[in-house]
Image (cartoon, coloured by chain):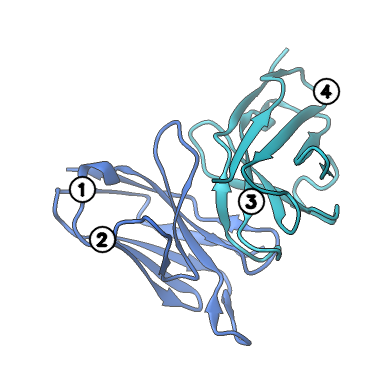
Chain colours: A blue, B cyan
Amino acid sequence: DIVMTQSPDSLAMSLGERATIHCKSSQSVLYSSNNKNFLAWFQQKPGQPPKLLIYWASTRESGVPDRFSGSGSGTDFTLTISSLQAEDVAVYYCHQYYSTPHTFGQGTKLEIK
Amino acid sequence: QVQLQESGPGLVKPSETLSLTCTVSGGSIISYYWSWIRQPPGKGLDWIGYISYTGSTNYNPSLRSRVTMSVDTSKNQFSLNLSSVTAADTAVYYCARHETSNWDSFFDYWGQGTLVTVSS
């Protein structure tokens, strides 16, 4: 299984600040034949299902604000929120779909300081 | 707009079988892969397995001995059976669509989730 490890487990930032969440996979999720990283990011608010934010490591889903961005390749990935808004309070998960079983990071809880 | 809705009992007794159905509306079940994912209360996301519209399956090895999935294209539904449940199977169960006709794709649509509690 590919183990996904996120850091930090929790994060408290002020409104307007930049928030950065890291995700590391135990093996590469870069598929060499198409040069794509099989890595997605989800946002989950209490009582709601996860919402897709980013796929292929850096492609923003339609309708997701451009303050959300993803980067990285191979085994190391980052989700950045450029200017934190109150509605961004949530738990964020990375997800690898390179191989089965699909696996998720343990989650990073983002709060407002 | 594609919508997924989980349905099934919210309470299951220990040692019995948990059975859930996911109904897809606003789109066809054909040409996609479909997954079940669960989330124990206060914890993270665990992938249970997927099924294709043709009935091809792949289960998480951690649950493989207890999981069965099926699909009914005429009803635009797919189902999950998890046998011999224990309290550790208490979770919110989600169904989700893979974005393409490949299993190695991300989940673009999710159901709202249904809480299943295992208790006598």
Image quarter of the N terminus of chain A: bottom right
The residue identified by callout 3 is B97
**Which quadrant would residue B65 be assigned to in this image?**
top right
The residue identified by callout 4 is B16
Q: Earlier in the sequence, mark 3 or mark 4?
A: 4
Q: Against B94, is A20 above or below?
A: below
Q: Secondary structure at mark 3?
A: strand
Q: x%, y% of residue B46?
A: 61, 46
**Separation of disc 4 and disc 2 at Cα?**
47 Å
* In the displayed structure image, the side of residue A22 where residue B76 appears, left or right: right
Of all chains, the one bearing label 2 is A
**Separation of disc 3 and disc 4 at Cα?**
27 Å
Q: Earlier in the sequence, mark 1 or mark 2?
A: 2
Name the residue type under label 4.
Glu
Q: Are marks 3 and 4 on the same chain?
A: yes
Name the residue type under label 1.
Gln
In this view, the mark in front (1 or 4) = 1
Q: Secondary structure at mark 2?
A: loop
**Separation of disc 3 and disc 1 at Cα?**
29 Å
Q: Which mark is residue A85?
A: 1
Q: Secondary structure at mark 4?
A: loop
Q: x%, y% of residue B32?
A: 71, 57
